[in-house]
Image (tube, rainbow, N blue to C red):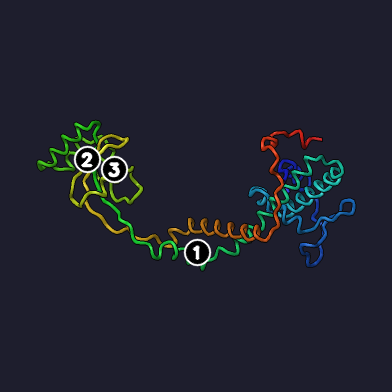
Amino acid sequence: MMVNFRVFAGALVLMAGLAMPSLAADPDAATVVARVNGTEITLGHMIALREQLPEQYLQLPDEVLFNGILDQLIQQLTVAQSAEDALSLRDRLVLDNNRRGYLTGALLDRAVEAGVTDTALQSLYDETYGTATPGTEYHAAHILLATKEEAAAIKAELDAGADFATLAQDRSTGPSGPNGGDLGWFGPGMMVQPFEDAVIALQAGEVSDPVETQFGWHVIRLNETRAAAAPTLDDTRQSLTEELQQRLITAQLAELAAAAAVERTDEAIDPAILKNSALIDN
């Protein structure tokens, strides 16, 4: 149920000075706290509404919050009863969709909550990383120039024995220039494709011919390579959790779809008819 927080806030102010009603010695979710025209409001209804409130309301004193929630539920039930017989077709259809959406979310949430366990995460981690061949990381430096001619001139100076770091500091237009062109360690996918391809083709200590990217012309030196360390379970917990959740949801939906008798009868309907909102006006 959607909470009208503006009305709710007003109810809190109104009810703040009223005494908390006496409850049974051992109240539970079925304990009746009010009736509106014979329809019961239970403690369970109140707890469910409290869980929907923004954090700011949860800081209120228990008595104020209790009375405010109860007043809100009484108000909602009073209005709902009066509106029940006057629901339009649009109202009924929206309520149907909202109820189905809520039930779908609740069921899938339970499936995810039951399925995302430490054991399941460890199993997915082993599946993903246990047999993976370690990748390669690269430590490289570059000198960035505006033109191919400038890059070629730098390459010629390097071939003649010039110091790479000094040239980078003096001539590179890139942000790594003051650091001698050093780019640190990086793995596949972290650099633009032409640059990465050139790095992969080099042996440690080699300098590339000029390489063009959208940033300009590069002369690249590969300093060294190393095997990339596999990420730990803690490193990947968030991404693994998201993947596991998606797998669980997909499996649950597939299981339910397989068990359902679904018959589509929409073949002759023009999809554009969905734009005709007048069909649900009455």
Residue 26: percent from left, percent from top: 78, 67
Residue bearing the label numbered 3 = 195
Q: Which mark is residue 121?
A: 1
Q: Residue at x 40, y 65 (%)?
A: 130
Instruction: Give me the C-alpha separation between circle 1 and circle 2.
Output: 44 Å
Q: Nearer the viewer, residue 204 or 67?
A: 204
Q: Amino acid at mark 2?
A: Val
Q: Amino acid at mark 3?
A: Phe
Mark 1 falls on what kind of element?
Answer: helix
Instruction: Give me the C-alpha separation between circle 3 and circle 2.
Output: 10 Å
Earlier residue among tags 1 and 3: 1
Q: Residue at x 17, y 40 (%)?
A: 166
Q: From the viewer's perspective, tell me whether residue 215 is left or right of residue 3.
A: left
Q: Residue at x 20, y 35 (%)?
A: 151
Extreme residue in the left direction: 160
Extreme residue in the right direction: 37
How many tags in the picture?
3
Mark 1: few/some/many CA within 10 Å (<14, 14-19, 20+): many
Mark 2: few/some/many CA within 10 Å (<14, 14-19, 20+): many
Mark 2 falls on what kind of element?
Answer: strand
Q: Which mark is residue 219?
A: 2
Residue 30: percent from left, percent from top: 79, 62
Q: Give the vertical position of 8 relative to 126 (above or below).
A: above
